[in-house]
Image (cartoon, rainbow, N blue to C red):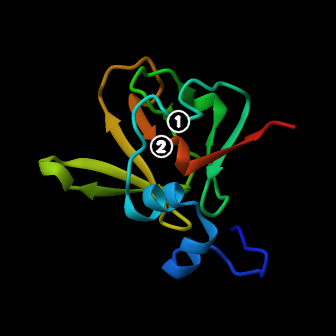
Amino acid sequence: MATTEGDQKLDKSTPEGAWKKLLSAQEYHILREKGTEPAGSGQYNKFYEQGTYVCAGCGTPLYESETKFNSGCGWPAYYDNLPGAVERHEDRAYGMIRTEITCANCGGHLGHVFKGEGFPTPTNERHCVNSVSVKFKPKE
């Protein structure tokens, strides 16, 4: 679990005022207000280095680079998350039913997960994640 410089833990109990001070305007909009970055605009869309993707809000490890694949959707795509790192919620916004994914530790919005699209991955899932929602930590 990540902490701020003042040793405040960053999790689901962190007040929104603290998130507003810690995150950039774009990070706050996507992580806390469930926004979406434009397709193809994210720094990790076509990025394939070896390492771990952590929550941009709290630093919790979410995805390993081995599960990242090129889905062509315009956002980083992963076929599986680290165990217990991501929660799923029904999202009925915009007149459709989707599965939203959030950081299990802080509740930050990551994106959506889609099943059964036929990608040649072990899970047949696509975790469509905003680049702004994650930060990359290279393998040492």
Residue 117, image x, y percentages? 30, 25
Question: Which of the marked residues, 2 or 1, is nearer the chain's N terminus?
Answer: 1
Residue type pointed to by label 2: Asn
The residue under the point 62% across, 26% down is: 47
**Residue furthest front in the image:** 25
Residue 9, image x, y percentages? 68, 78
State whether residue 14 appears in this view. Answer: no
In this view, the residue in front, 27 or 48, is 27
Dots 2 and 1: beta carbons under 8 Å?
yes
In this view, the residue in front, 103 or 17, is 17
State the image quarter where residue 136 is shown.
top right
Residue with the mark numbered 2: 130
State the image quarter where residue 124 is shown.
top left
Residue 95, image x, y percentages? 12, 49
Q: In what quadrant of the picture does the N terminus appear?
A: bottom right
Residue type pointed to by label 1: Gly
Q: In what quadrant of the picture does the C terminus appear?
A: top right
Residue 61 appears left or right of 96:
right
Helix, strand or loop status at disc 2: loop
Residue with the mark numbered 1: 42
Q: Above or below — where is 80 with respect to 135?
A: above
State whether residue 76 appears in this view. Answer: yes
Pointer 2: residues within 10 angstroms few (<14), some, or many (20+)? many
Pointer 1: residues within 10 angstroms few (<14), some, or many (20+)? some
